[in-house]
Image: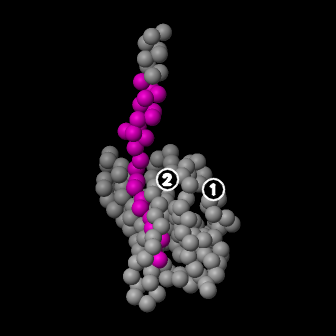
Amino acid sequence: MKTLSCLLACLALTAWSPAARAEHARIDLRVIHLDPETGTEGEAVSAQVDVDPPEGGRNKRPLARVKAGEPLALQFFLTNTYPHGVKKDVAVRYFLVREDKAGQKKVPALGKGTVIEGQFKLNFKPQCRVGSRVACHIDEPGVYLLRVETVNTDSDHEHFSAIDVQVDKAR
């Protein structure tokens, strides 16, 4: 009985240790306000990596508040932190799409409400990085989801980073 108790305790500690829960990607995502005249960076809202499943992740998404038509920069860097070889044919998708409400778990379908979308497909070596910076503006007031995600990592979960963007009417 002692052996079984020790084994269960070791398994529980291993399951919750940082090494056992190590993630395969680090994603730094930002929505940056740009000065309309100079283009210099102003206030920014940032998010870090989360995982699917569960649907919509585990972390509450930050909220960026902007005005319709305001110049913005959407920026991310994704670093492969998987140390055991190459992850082949991984896609990194990014998009900004209208959603029903801030914090909703279901990712909206891309299509009519999509403002920006893009994708990279590559083989990720350990510590490989990919990123993008896109200047844009959102003309229609509403709530939008900015999301960067991995696809096809050959894992039981995918990684993403997301920010809700509340677009208010311009003054």
Q: Of helix, strand and loop, which one carries label 1?
A: loop
> Residue 72: x percent and y percent?
48, 78
| Residue type, label 1 | Lys
Q: Is residue 101 above or below residue 167?
A: above
Location of residue 54 in the rendering, given as x and y in whole percent from the top left corner: 58, 48
Q: Which residue is mark 1?
A: 105
Residue 30 on the magenta segment: yes
Residue 111 magenta-highlighted: no
Residue drawn at (41%, 31%) of the image? 14
102 or 131: nearer the eye?
102
Front residue of 53 and 66: 66
Q: How far from the left and from the top, in percent, is residue 90?
A: 43, 58
The residue sitting at 31% across, 53% down in the picture is: 126
Nearer to me, 167 or 128: 167
Q: Quadrant of residue 164?
A: bottom right
Question: How far across and down, in percent of the image, does residue 132 sit?
Answer: 40, 71
Span highlighted in magenta in the image: 10-33
Which residue shows up at 65% across the image and 67% down it?
99
- Residue 139 visible in the current orientation: no
Secondary structure at numbered mark 2: strand
Left-right relation of 144 to 83? right
Judge the density around disc 1: few (<14), some (14-19), many (≥20) Cα neighbours within 10 Å.
few
| Mark found first going from the N terminus, 2 or 1 | 2
Q: Which residue is mark 2?
A: 50
